[in-house]
Image (spheres, rainbow, N blue to C red):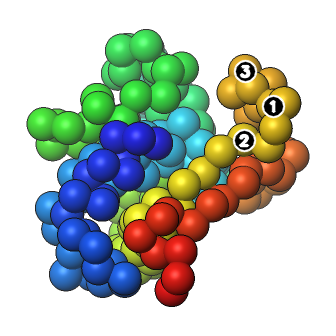
Amino acid sequence: MEKLQNEVRGLAQGKAEITEDDLGNMQYLKAVIKETLRLHPPVPLLVPRETTEDIKLLGYHIAAKTQVLINAWAIGRDPLSWDDPEEYRPERFLNSDIDFKGLNFELIPFGAGRRGCPGSVFAIVVNELALANLVNKFNFALPQGIKPEDLDMTEGSGLTVRRKSPLLAVATPCSSYADH
Ligand code: HEM
């Protein structure tokens, strides 16, 4: 959080509102969002596919018209692709070309190919803007008496997935914005 705030506040230079033009240089912010989508893809099984013809893949015979689910959640935590996969470490994306545009199959929170998410660019900009503005203007802390290790990071279940229990955080306006 501190590292993210330092980057955002350093580049925002006291601006009351961060706009799209400011996002370009916020590399750590982009890495935070990638790392979050790697560990917690909101659509963990993507959208089901159906094979159009018989196919042999890695020794498996998959008949035509079989429904196939792609487990993006497991792919994002595959130790063959990721060092310390269970660890939340945005730094892994700094100086890395891995992106979620559907070309790096180890990171596919928006799917890939012709039926990949058409809203991904919009979704990312909205998320970047929201997160950058929140950490620019507010400091965040856990409610009194709650330690980071007490946080329940369990996910709910369903076609789209969110936290099972809401995150309780105390937001305090950063002193330079307290009057805005
Ligand atoms: C963080 C936000 C979002 C995530 C993680 C997400 C993820 C996904 C995923 C995984 C798929 C299935 C892709 C596949 O199976 O290959 C999908 C499809 C789709 N998404 Fe998104 N999405 C997000 C935001 C949006 C937004 C903002 C829009 C619209 C403005 C949108 C519109 C669609 C549509 C229309 C499809 C169906 C595409 C098709 O079947 O051809 N999504 N999305």
Q: In the structure shown, which secondary structural element does the residue marked by tag 1 occupy?
A: loop
User: Marks 2 and 3: which is nearer the front?
Assistant: 2
Above or below for 116 versus 99 = below
Residue 126 picture location, percent across and down: 45, 77
Q: Visible in this render: residue 127?
A: no
Left or right: 2, with 142 as reference point = left
- Residue drawn at x 26%, y 52% is 7
Q: Which mark is residue 38?
A: none
Q: Which mark is residue 142?
A: 2
Left or right: 81, with 61 as reference point = left
Q: CA separation, marks 2 and 3?
A: 11 Å
Task: Give the class, few, some or many, for how many residues have Cα within 10 Å of label 1's Cα (few <14, many ≥20).
Answer: few
Q: In the structure shown, which secondary structural element does the residue marked by tag 3 occupy?
A: helix
User: Marks 1 and 3: which is nearer the front?
Assistant: 1
Task: Give the class, few, some or many, for how many residues have Cα within 10 Å of label 3's Cα (few <14, many ≥20).
Answer: few
Earlier along the polypeptide chain: callout 2 or callout 3?
2
Q: Nearer the viewer, residue 129 or 64?
A: 129
Residue that carries the numbered disc 1 in the rendered image: 146
- Residue drawn at x 35%, y 61% is 113
Residue that carries the numbered disc 3 in the rendered image: 149
Residue 29 picture location, percent across and down: 33, 53
